[in-house]
Image (cartoon, rainbow, N blue to C red):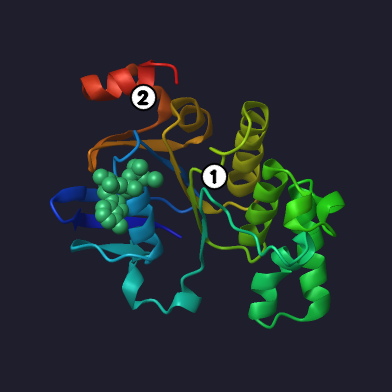
Amino acid sequence: MSVELRNITKKFGDVVAVKNANLKINRGEFFVFLGPSGSGKSTLLRIIAGLDDPDEGEVLIDGIRVNELDPSQRDIAFVFQNYALYPHMTAYDNIAFPLRMRKVPKEQIHASVLEVANMLGITHLLSKYPYQMSGGEQQRVALARAIVRRPKVFLLDEPLSNLDAKLRVRLRFELRKLLHDQLQTTTIYVTHDQTEAMTMADRIAVINKGEILQVDSPSRLYEYPANTFVAGFIGTPP
Ligand code: ADP
Ligand code: MG
């Protein structure tokens, strides 16, 4: 599905969290919002998810306003930084949960859970409870839970920021391969990490103080930064 932002503005009191954002994200694209802390990335993502309303403007999913879509029709999955698994459920039950809620037949649930667990390399964790798993393992389970119902649009808000450096690097590649190459999902990914953005994205929107400063491919951003903020932010190692 394509996602279009038209003149989106969002304020919190005097703070303009998002200032007149205009953007079209193509179907199947791996799109990254890159900006420093407080630049408005999460606010934008919440608005795209329909979890928050903008003060002005609209979000179109395949040409239809997101707030006119019934939540069950939205087909959008959201993974936050602080992925919360259900603590009293095993990994298997956590992943199966969204399908059980949709009354998917039991055999089909079983097949889907195994398939997605296989993709993420977590079949050995399925009988474990969250407290028995490391942060990285829990994060994979959270991703599996979001992926299992095959959303058309996948929104991820700094999903790797709590993981150790080695796992973070590995998951960058795995996530892109899975979401972009295998599932061909439209992915909107938020990060403050330049390297993450540059290695994962088809296109990047650099955002600062609520304003989208430039939207371009990683190589074009690097070669032709639109202004000194973009140049500094892209060029400086994290
Ligand atoms: P980012 O995700 O890029 O770190 P956010 O979208 O969380 O940035 O925040 C953008 C700005 O909006 C910040 O100044 C933040 O303090 C403010 N903000 C975000 N959410 C709220 C809220 N619910 N109430 C008040 N201010 C908020
Ligand atoms: Mg944020």
User: Which residue: 41% across, 57% down?
Assistant: 2
Q: Give how far apart the Cα atoms at labels 2 and 1 are.
A: 25 Å
Under tag 1, what secondary structure? Answer: loop
Nearer to us in this view, 86 or 59 = 86
Nearer to us in this view, 181 or 57 = 57
Residue 194 in the image: state x and y as whole percent: 44, 27
Which of the 4 image quarters holds residue 145? Answer: bottom right
Residue 229 in the image: state x and y as whole percent: 24, 23
Q: Which mark is residue 199?
A: none
**On screen, residue 41 above or below 168:** below
Q: Amino acid at mark 2?
A: Arg
- Residue behind mark 2: 220
Density class for disc 2 (Cα within 10 Å; few <14, some 14-19, many ≥20) is few
Residue 51 in the image: state x and y as whole percent: 38, 66
**On screen, residue 176 above or below 79:** above
Q: Amino acid at mark 1?
A: Pro
User: Which residue: 55% across, 54% down?
Assistant: 185
Ligand 2 within 8 angstroms of badge 1 C-beta: no
Nearer to us in this view, 89 or 177 = 89
Which of the 4 image quarters holds residue 130? Answer: bottom right
Q: Which mark is residue 159?
A: 1
Residue 21 in the image: state x and y as whole percent: 23, 49
